[in-house]
Amino acid sequence: MMPRFSSARLLLALALGILLAQTPSGAQEPVKAPQRPQLKPTQKTEPDETLAAAQAALEGKEYARAVELLENYLTCHPDHLGARFNLAYSYALLGRLAEAITAYRKTLELDPKLFQAYLNLGLLLLQEGAPAEAVKALVQAVELRPEHVPARLAYAEALARNGNKQEAHAQYQEVMTREPQNVDALCALARLELEAGEYVTAETHLRQTLALTPEQAELHWWLAEALLGQDKLEAAVAELEVYLQAQPQDTAAHLRLGNLYRDLKRSQEALQHFDAALAAGATSPELTAARARTLADLKRWEEAAAAFATLIAAEPQNAQWQFELGLARLRQGQLEAAVSAFNHAIRLRADFIEAYNSLALALQLAGNCAATLDVLDQRARYAQETAGTYFLRAICHDRLRQLEAAVENYQKFLAASDNPNSPQAFQAQQRLHLLKQQLQRR
């Protein structure tokens, strides 16, 4: 399962900060605190009044008015770099991203060395789902300003989204050489390492990040994934518990943690998380089935059967749920209902071996030995005999007084069994001794 914390959040925040910090000139100047783009006409002319009005509109966050003024101005002055840049900026803040992208490209035609235009263009292309194009813009930004960490982070993100994971990793590492405690780079490195199955390194980077930003609850989810990759199940569960303390309404996390508790045979805790997911409004077959299986683990058979019946009502063609309903009924001693459910499962899936096994057992417990043998014969079309099927055959032949067949199957059971000291093995040995004596007396 992929981590829940996404670097897309980083890029969105980064884009906002950079867009608010741009100036139409001075591409080599460092980005300072967020500020509006400044228009710098060279003469006091009538067009200068239009630019001043556009600047005022930008400062007043009247972006639609700024667009109107700048579009009119550029009709007569298409080569004005500042107006072109600020038009792209205004389009972006209005959410008119395609027009912003076009405007930034026209800006770069006027000044192919304008760092801010490459950076903003790349970020917009990322937002528009065009990582390959974003890479082309952002590599230019990085070449113009190799020391600019946000630009390198954006470039790395574009590389990662474009599938260039190794190069993206190298770019994030480059950020770390410049800023060893850069949380965004640490998070991104952990993401790439989790995707690559490098769980130990991912754990290291995540613990470093948590030390710097302990308030980031999502990091505990990531860390749980890194620990699960190392089979550290108990530690992963602990991290997910921490995550849920901060995000108690996350139903997917409750489901995830509940399933992990089931793996640990901690059924009561699993049930608590499944119930929490339900209380938070989650409704899914996956959740209902997990909860039903946990109820079965707790031997709450009637509740488990009711839950599986609910699932079947919504999806009657699901052979697995029919089978599990049969198991719950079998555990309750409701043999007829169990036989019905197992038969239904087999009708839906002809090669459902576990259903054949359980159906044969239910029929044998009901005393219907002839039907048990028929089911075992059907099963034999799809799978080899096992110690268990030999034992059931032996019991049924024994009860039907088919002595030779009973002896044969008891012997096959003992040969196939891996536990010669089991109660079944003892029973088989005793019955063999008696049956052989009876055959000798014939």
Image (spheres, rainbow, N blue to C red):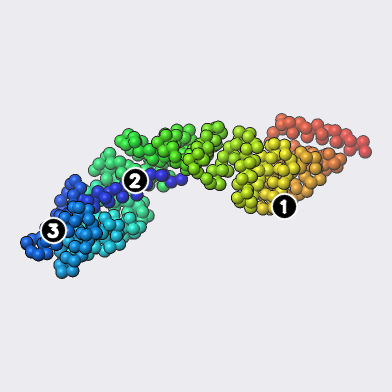
Neighbour class for label 1 at 10 Å: few (<14), some, many (≥20)?
Answer: few
Mark 1 vs 3, N-terminal side? 3
Q: Is residue 139 visible?
A: no
CB of mark 1 within 8 Å of CB of mark 3?
Answer: no
Quarter of the image with the C terminus is top right
Residue that mark 3 sits on: 52
* SS for dot 1: loop
Residue type pointed to by label 1:
Arg
Q: Secondary structure at mark 3?
A: helix
Badge nearest the viewer, 1 or 2? 2
Distance from disc 1 to disc 3, alpha carbons, whole Å, reads 86 Å
Residue beneath disc 2: 188
Front residue of this view, candidates 359 and 418: 359
* Front residue of 274 and 440: 274
Circles 1 and 2: CB atoms closer than 8 Å: no
Along the polypeptide, which appears first: circle 3 or circle 2?
3
- Residue type, label 3: Ala
